[in-house]
């Protein structure tokens, strides 16, 4: 997940689909996010590059919808339902995830282990460009 | 520590002991002469200092007229019965006669009672000791060592009692309260009962039977003195200590300009609370300046004159005081007044605009004058120099004392000061003489020009000014509850003087529930938050 400013970024992503769980009046996903372009990237314990201002998963509720769908702590969220999450503020990210009219969110997430897995196996042929 | 009978610092034997026969007869005479005292017991006067000349007959008469109305609307709860009524008579008489004569009568009356009771108290133990020697000296057993030791004890205890009574009761009075000081009266009655019962016992068991055991008699006298010391302890607790702990918070508001202060008081009767409030009034509240209220009064007058109501329908105009049967008229009067109020609210007059600009202009003018004044005073102060002792001998030239120095530099700042005082409407509070005196005081104490100006730039408390500017020397306590009853939560009473009144409302300080929570000093642990984390 190296990031060179000005150059298009490539990453290995995993598609995760989470069904929102209804709890009372709210629809919850069962995880917490941190990061954003208005936050301090140096404090992010999960990012490799300490200037990465992306949205990261900081905590997962055990046996919550996110946990069931396979989301892991430390994942960086690249897209939510087609909306880009690499250059958003913290609040915008929260809003994209908590839209009341949507019952399901389709995330594209990336993590270090994915890239390593791809490198170890085929040598880069299955890389998908995010759009 | 004052009763209504004035100046009663004199003793705790305030003149209202019920057992005193002399007083009872006098009150009976007063009863007959009482006739039409229509003034209810509610409005009573407090004089803040002895021998204070009244404001004038007009004020007095004004008070009495108002008191008639009060008599109808307030509940009649009296402290003590005929004694307080006779006191009313005394007060009325003193108001008609010259002030000092009347007050002296009250004073002496209380003083004589106090002295009588005091003598009775102090001489009783001595009498107990001396009488057996006088009446049956032959039969009496001689006094042994232990008995003579008790003599010393009696002597010293009496001395201590004398000093203690002097310290607690013989103080110059600071006010005359309208009513009996209940605790003092109770204590006087208690002491009297005590002494009387001791005498009874003595008379029956010792005098009649001519007891020979002198030591027993001495011990009896010692026990009397001990008991008197304990009663004195009771007096201290009831009169002094009980009201020290703050229990009520009173809110005092001046009716004319709304200045408000809050004080903490203990458990006091209403009259003593009024006294405490008045003492603090003189120190804390800025002096009442009627000139400052003229603006709002003129505005109010303009409001009233602004709207006229015409009756287009040709009905009779409003005269609502016709009686309960005239419902139509009163109804119309109500609707008329309501219409007037509504119209006034809608009326688009620009009085608020006027007020705003007027106030801004006034502010600017005051600041300009103040700047000129400060400069003038500073300059004036540079003209004189305070010389030290040694220098005085060296330069035997034109040496002046403070008054002359003040008179020398005063003219240079007089005009600016006067203009400033006129702008802030304080000119009637300060006379030329008082300003010069203050200037002499400041320069002899090496004060800076700013210190000299401080008393003119801000209105100070009432005590700062000379007595003829006070506008607040005679007070009337107006209360719905009896003035000897204690303060209660929600009580309201009014202290009225000729120009304004102080409205006092009482609130109880809430009962405080304090609980503890122990925090182990080692339990302070911190963790860094990962920026902001939102759960979705």
Image: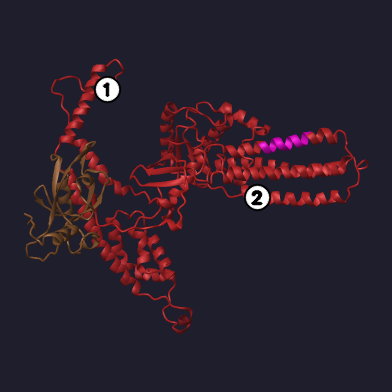
Chain colours: A brown, B red
Mark sitting on residue B166: 2
Which class describes the residues within 10 Å of circle 1: few (<14), some (14-19), or many (20+)?
some
Quarter holding residue B217: top right
Query: Circle 1 marks a residue in which chain?
Result: B
Q: Secondary structure at mark 2?
A: helix
Residue B258: percent from left, percent from top:
34, 44
Q: Position of residue A10 (x, y in %)?
A: 9, 60
Residue B308 lies left or right of residue B3; in this view the side is left
B514 or B448, which is in the foreground? B514
Q: Quadrant of the N terminus of chain B?
A: top right
Q: Which mark is residue B320?
A: 1
In this image, B374 relative to A127: left or right?
right
**Residue that sits furthest to the top in the current view:** B325
Q: Is residue B191 magenta?
A: yes
The front one of B51 and B282 is B282
Q: Residue at x 59, y 42 (%)?
A: B238
Q: Which residues are the magenta region?
A: B190-200
Q: Residue at x 22, y 28 (%)?
A: B337
Which subunit holds the residue at mark 2?
Answer: B
Residue B1 can be seen, yes or no: no
Say whether disc 1 or disc 2 marks the residue closer to the N-terminus: 2
Give me the residue at 62% from left, 45% from top: B236
């Amino acid at each position: 997940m190296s990031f060179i400013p000005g150059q298009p970024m490539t990453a290995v992503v995993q598609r995760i689909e989470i069904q929102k769980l209804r709890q009372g009046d709210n629809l919850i996903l069962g995880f917490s996010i941190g990061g954003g372009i208005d936050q301090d990237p140096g404090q992010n314990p999960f990012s490799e590059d300490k200037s990465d201002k992306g949205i990261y998963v900081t905590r997962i509720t055990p046996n919550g919808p996110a946990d069931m769908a396979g989301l892991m702590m430390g994942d960086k969220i690249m897209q939510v339902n087609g909306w880009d999450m690499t250059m958003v503020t913290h609040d915008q990210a929260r809003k994209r995830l908590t839209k009341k009219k949507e019952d399901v969110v389709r995330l594209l997430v990336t993590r270090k282990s994915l890239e390593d897995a791809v490198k170890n196996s085929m040598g880069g042929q299955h890389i998908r460009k995010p759009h | 520590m004052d009763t209504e009978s004035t100046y009663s610092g004199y003793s705790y034997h305030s003149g209202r002991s019920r057992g005193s026969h002399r007083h009872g007869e006098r009150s009976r005479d007063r009863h007959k002469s009482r006739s039409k005292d229509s003034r209810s017991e509610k409005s009573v006067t407090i004089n803040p200092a002895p021998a204070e000349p009244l404001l004038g007959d007009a004020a007095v008469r004004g008070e009495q007229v108002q008191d008639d109305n009060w008599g109808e609307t307030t509940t009649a709860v009296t402290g003590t019965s005929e004694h307080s009524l006779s006191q009313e008579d005394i007060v009325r008489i003193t108001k008609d006669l010259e002030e000092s004569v009347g007050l002296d009568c009250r004073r002496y009356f209380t003083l004589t009672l106090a002295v009588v009771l005091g003598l009775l108290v102090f001489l009783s133990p001595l009498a107990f000791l001396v009488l057996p020697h006088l009446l049956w000296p032959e039969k009496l057993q001689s006094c042994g060592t232990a008995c003579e030791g008790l003599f010393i004890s009696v002597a010293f205890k009496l001395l201590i009692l004398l000093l203690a009574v002097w310290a607690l009761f013989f103080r110059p009075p600071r006010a005359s309260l309208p009513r009996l000081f209940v605790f003092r009266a109770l204590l006087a009655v208690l002491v009297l009962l005590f002494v009387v019962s001791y005498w009874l016992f003595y008379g029956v068991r010792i005098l009649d039977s001519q007891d020979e055991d002198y030591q027993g008699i001495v011990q009896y006298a010692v026990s009397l003195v001990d008991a008197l010391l304990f009663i004195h302890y009771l007096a201290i607790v009831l009169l002094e200590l009980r009201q020290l702990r703050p229990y009520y918070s009173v809110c005092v508001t001046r009716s004319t300009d709304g200045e408000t202060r809050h004080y903490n008081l203990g458990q006091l009767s209403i009259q003593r609370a009024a006294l405490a409030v008045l003492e603090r009034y003189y120190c804390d509240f800025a002096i009442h300046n009627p000139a400052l209220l003229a603006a709002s009064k003129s505005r109010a007058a303009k409001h009233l004159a602004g709207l006229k109501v015409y009756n287009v329908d040709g009905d009779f105009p409003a005269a609502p005081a016709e009686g309960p049967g005239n419902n139509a008229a009163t109804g119309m009067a109500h609707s008329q007044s309501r219409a007037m109020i509504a119209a006034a609210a809608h009326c688009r007059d620009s009085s608020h605009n006027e007020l705003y600009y007027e106030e801004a202009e006034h502010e600017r003018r005051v600041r300009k004058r103040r700047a000129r004044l400060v400069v003038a005073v500073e300059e004036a102060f540079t003209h004189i120099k305070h010389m030290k002792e040694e220098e005085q001998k060296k330069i035997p030239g034109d040496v002046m004392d403070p008054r002359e120095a003040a008179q020398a530099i005063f003219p240079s700042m007089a005009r600016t000061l006067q203009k400033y005082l006129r702008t802030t409407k304080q000119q009637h509070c300060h006379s030329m003489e008082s300003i010069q005196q203050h200037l002499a005081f400041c320069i002899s104490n090496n004060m800076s020009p700013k210190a000299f100006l401080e008393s003119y730039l801000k209105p100070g408390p009432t005590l700062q000014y000379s007595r003829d500017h006070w506008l607040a020397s005679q007070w009337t306590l107006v209360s719905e509850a009896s003035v000897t009853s204690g303060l209660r939560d929600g009580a309201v009473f009014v202290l009225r003087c000729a120009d304004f009144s102080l409205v006092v409302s009482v609130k109880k300080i809430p009962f405080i529930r304090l609980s503890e929570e122990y925090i182990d000093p080692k339990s302070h642990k911190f963790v860094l938050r990962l920026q902001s984390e939102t759960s979705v």
